[in-house]
Image (tube, helix red, strand yellow):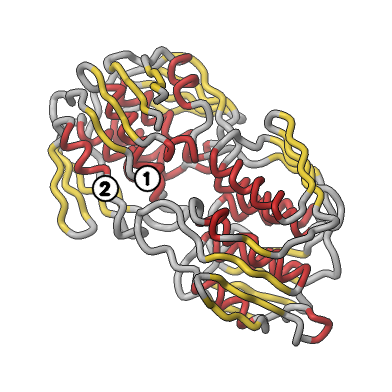
Amino acid sequence: MDKLLITGGNRLHGEVVISGAKNAALPILCASLLAETPLHLKSVAALKDIDTTIKLLDTMGVKIARDGSEVTLDAGEVASFEATYEMVKTMRASILVLGPLLARFGTARVSLPGGCAIGSRPVDLHIKGLQAMGAAIHITHGYIQASTLHLPNRRLQGVRYYMDMVTVTGTENLMMAAALAQGTTVLENAAKEPEVVDLAEMLVKMGANITGAGTDVITIIGVEKLNGTTHNVVCDRIEAGTYMVAAAMTGGEVKLLNARADLLDAVIEKLREAGATVTSELDTITVKSDGNLKAVNIRTAPHPAFPTDMQAQFMALNTIAQGVAKVTETIFENRFMHVQEMQRMGADISIDGNTALVKGVPFLDGATVMATDLRASASLVLAGLVARGDTVIERIYHLDRGYEHLEEKLNKLGANVKRISQ
């Protein structure tokens, strides 16, 4: 199992290219199941989760050609409608094949998913939404067995559906299913994340009739069929935010290319509040800092508020900032697992329920720490960049799920990061 060895103390300077968003690419890849002709995607990052999704689609009979960051998927002759436990257990996003399979083929057998251990992320909203559209669904032996064969024309039926809680993957799954349903579907309390908008924009290019993406009410008028298209995956706002925090913490100056400031308003506001200078133009963002940062309070909430996927990174920032900060996590109940590891590096953090109190310290010390989930891994990398001495991060397979060429990009900016393969 690979490790990262980070020697801290270097200021980051230079330019970094932000990859296509993992959380946009995953549903978009699954949407290939809806199309009767090939779908061509650009800016698809080389990540473990992307590889897993492509492998899953391949087992179903989707013909796939991959050339660097471009992927072509042809689901003209899908042979299997099953996502096995072996394929799904490492990644929760695999549930996103359920809606497309059911909408186009009328049947699906999908294992209940696995993934990061950051708390309960139930798929019951996906299931309830599909049941509201008329699907017959049974869960047996850890599998979701779904069918529309009893429905008129064997098609899902349009419905008005209110989601009890905001769910990104739930919104995406139901939006994809509704694209081929009979009649009009209205999704209320829908997720507004940029990745949902990116999926909707691609589905429209494929021939879907979708309005309201980016608001909490999305309307989908079902169509008879969808065809492939060419689509450029939106940039990864969480990867961008991570490098922005890295620049601020190390007292450097970094220009991010292929990065959209309009997707990062809450993050930019907090970086400026911490004392960093953030400027943007077109598809570039520049972050500059002298390293003397002020503690900033963080409270996570669904988009457009502060993203839960940036909480751990800002906790790392607060560990070396002047003052005391409250970090409140409202999305996932187990998303403070990085705290214990940061404490090993000398961080002063105490937890009370879903709130962490972070008192800035003059410096962190390098230590051997363990990554527990994707964003926790990123926060430990940030801590290692500013710590005195060497930091070893174990179980970095989490990082490989969501950050493309992390050590290469950091080293190009002047960091000292080495991958140790065992």
The mark nearer the N terminus, 2 or 1, is: 2
Residue 266 coordinates in the image, percent (x, y): 41, 45
Q: Quadrant of the C terminus?
A: top left
Q: Residue at x 58, y 32 (%)?
A: 19
Compared across the picture, whether 214 is left or right of 277 comes to right
The residue indicated by pointer 2 is 337
Disc 2, disc 1: CB below 8 Å? yes
Q: Nearer the viewer, residue 73 or 311?
A: 73
The residue indicated by pointer 1 is 373
The amino acid type of the residue labelled 2 equals Met
- Look at the numbered disc 1 and give the secondary structure of its residue: loop
Q: Nearer the viewer, residue 363 or 74?
A: 74
Please say if 200 is above or below 270: below
Question: Do we see residue 377 in this rendering?
Answer: yes
- Look at the numbered disc 2 and give the secondary structure of its residue: loop
Residue 336 coordinates in the image, percent (x, y): 26, 49
Quadrant assignment, res 395: top left
Compared across the picture, whether 254 is left or right of 330 comes to right
